[in-house]
Image (tube, coloured by chain):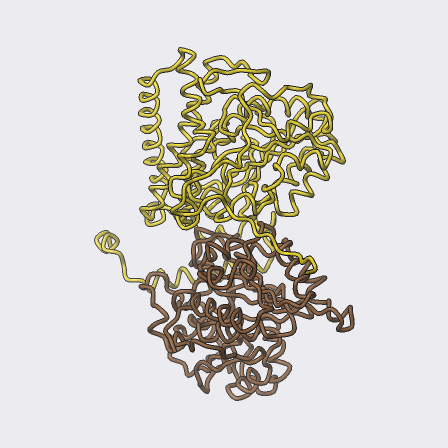
Amino acid sequence: MARMNMVQALNSAMDVMLGRDPRVVILGEDVGFFGGVFRATDGLQRKHGEHRVLDTPIAEGGIIATAIGMGVNGLKPVAEIQFADYIYPGFDQVVSELARLRYRSAGEFPAPVTIRTPCGGGIRGGQTHSQSPEAIFTHVCGIKVVMPSNPYDAKGLLISAIEDEDPVVFFEPKRIYNGPFDGDPHKPAVPWSAHARGEVPDGHYTVPIGRAEIVREGGDVTVLAYGTMVHVCEAAVRLVGVDAEIIDVRTMAPLDVDTLCTSVCKTGRCVVVHEATRFGGYGAELVATVQEQCFWNLEAPIQRVAGWDTPYPHAFEWDYFPGQARIAAALRQVMEAS
Amino acid sequence: MTPRSRLHVPSPPARPGQEPDFSYVQISPAGAAPRPDVTATAREIEDLSVAMVRVLGDDHRAVGPWNPHLEPAELQVGLRHMVLTRLFDDRMQRIQRQGRISFYIKSTGEEAVAVAACMALQPGDMLFPSYRQQGLHVVRGRPLVDLMCQCLSNTRDMCKGRQMPIMYHWGKGNIFSISGNLATQFPQAVGWAMAAAIKGEDRLAASWIGEGSSAEADFHYAMTFAAVYRAPVILNLVNNQWAISTFQGFAGGERNTFAQRGPGYGIPGLRVDGNDFLAVYAVTQWAAQRARQSAGPTLIELVTYRAAAHSTSDDSSRYRPKDEYRAWPLGDPVMRLKQHLIALGEWSEERHAQLEKELEAHVTASWKEAESYGTLSGGPALDPLTMFEDVFKDMPPNLVRQREELRRLRESQAAAAPAAPSAAKEG
């Protein structure tokens, strides 16, 4: 066991997999010699060689397309897209190719590619370094979509993603790379070393794709969140003083419907939280699923708390970010309804 | 043994701790490259995509057919713009380091790329820059205060607080909005130029991308559409050797020049000394004449060096020799133009020092004014409710509702917050 922040945990996952499986290759902009702009691949090229940890030209479409070709030819590529906001030039390769190759070739040409990409705001990144585009990918059939909320899950889920025979888009909430963030930018930063989930095994282990995790057990209301928002929800629940059950969705596709709906059927109330914009967001899928399964147990309309339906504004980051106050208001609203 | 393929992984000539080595940069003597007629075909002038157009010689004299024969007064204006751009960059970098803006990108060492090109164009020509051509704004007369206010996201910010620092735009100045996503502006410039041709206007478009981002498919779109429609566009590829940590070999510069891509599309490719103010001016003038005569687009590779780190978020000492810039064989654009003017008898060290002093004071005064319109930590601030504007021309109902929700939230937070001491006194 070691204390790791999320970047170190991701680095460890790739290090372990490069060591265990000669098919694994890493590719992306600045990932090789430099070790990535967020340091996630630091030291990996030096250790595993420049044929396994490749710097690439600046071409996200090219990175994803060549990763597909490598995957078809028997490798297990892990592509880094430097910011999720930069992924769109590769979108056709994801939607029309990566997601459907197994289907259209009747299983003959699958491409087991993992795409890692940092997402989310709260770093003064403006609209091109802050987006959370997970719903754009969950809407595509044939790819798995994952977002960890802590170092332990980050490593375990990334190893699962690399070992998976199907493509996985792996979103990394960069605001919590160095420590959990409760939504209050004025508080001093907290490191992962002070958090239970900052304890990470050195070697190989997995966290299964398709399983949510109950972060806090409670009986009054179920809070569904993932990524950075898990920590913001924990703080909001403390603020309101409600006995909430907080569930870290962790893998958006496939979705662990049982864990989510068992909880909501128990509590009868539900708040769904994500940083991404609200309209057509992943929260809509969660709400629809919950009401289908739990309608007769619901005591109140399900509330959604999400980013506003605007691009992420540089100057108004904390008015945009769905922080504790907005989550608390939603919690109070579902608790007051009868 | 049967032959096996082996992956070639490009490697830069020098890494931290090693001697800088720019022997890979092929340099023609000043004045050596011929200046063809602007109606020449790409094939006829293919040599110019390998040679290097240079005007300023080592003796600081202007030589050869590309000499644009500018008046000393005009050269002095160019020098002034470049010095101002550099001083502005230096100041903003320091301000970022003090935590007073969130981010900055310098153009140090590449000032001629924007300044000389812009001076060779007409004010009505439309510019589609990347994030490292702040010199365009300087040439077109944008007050530094405006640029600083954008970096501050304050009440005078042209972007209304929505963009990261340096993502400027200027409708009146015909300078397009800068994107944080790379290379997108290149084919957009071609479309703008096509529209100018469709409308029968005597205006052209010019765009800039880095050699690194020329790997994006947008580069190919731009070249193909420009060639097909012979769009009146100048496509500038700024080869500053480094794309964050990857050297130009990773963009495909190891065996061919970037200018050589032009002839492959049927577009003339001109390779130019990007730190030679006169050469940059001259090739831009040539390409502009060509575009205005419906002779078609030009790809210009500007060979320069990114003297600063990629941005304030980058640490270039991790991946390249610290003093690499000092070994750069094409020198510094500001120093070279300054020395040329001195050689002409039209400038002196004293006048240069005086200019720097004057422009430093201008930068200081501009910053002082910009801060009066608000900073990240205090002073007047933009209304956060404006974030819902301009998503659409008319605000749709979901945004009206969300704006109202935020208004109520802010009011309740203001009511709950303890009264500020000054307010208590007044009360």
Q: Is residue B9 left or right of residue A185?
A: right
What x and y, as percent, mark residue A263?
53, 85
User: Residue B58 versus residue B162: which sits nearer the camera?
Assistant: B58
Quarter containing the N terminus of chain A = bottom left
Question: Which residue, as the protein is rendered here, is positioned at the far front?
Answer: B1
Left or right of A181? Residue B304 is right
Percent coordinates x, y for residue B107 in the rendering: 45, 36
Taking the spot 44% from the left edge, 47% from the top edge, the residue there is B15
Taking depth in this image into account, of A335 and A270 the one nearest to the observer is: A270
Above or below, B193 relative to A97? above
Colour yellow maps to chain: B
Picture quadrant of residue B76: top left
Residue shown at 64% from the left, 32% from the top: B299
Question: From this viewpoint, is residue B279 visible?
Answer: yes
Which one is in front, A243 or B142? B142
Q: Residue at the left extreme?
A: B425
Judge whether A52 appears above or below B238 on screen.
Answer: below
Colour of chain A as rendered = brown
Give the number of marks. Answer: 0
Tell me which corner region of the image, top left, top right, bottom left or bottom right, holds residue B122. Answer: top right
Asked whether residue A237 is in view, the answer is no
Q: Is residue B132 left or right of residue B188?
A: left
Q: Position of residue A44 (x, y in %)?
A: 48, 62
Q: Position of residue B304 (x, y in %)?
A: 50, 34
- Foreground of the two, A110 or B129: A110
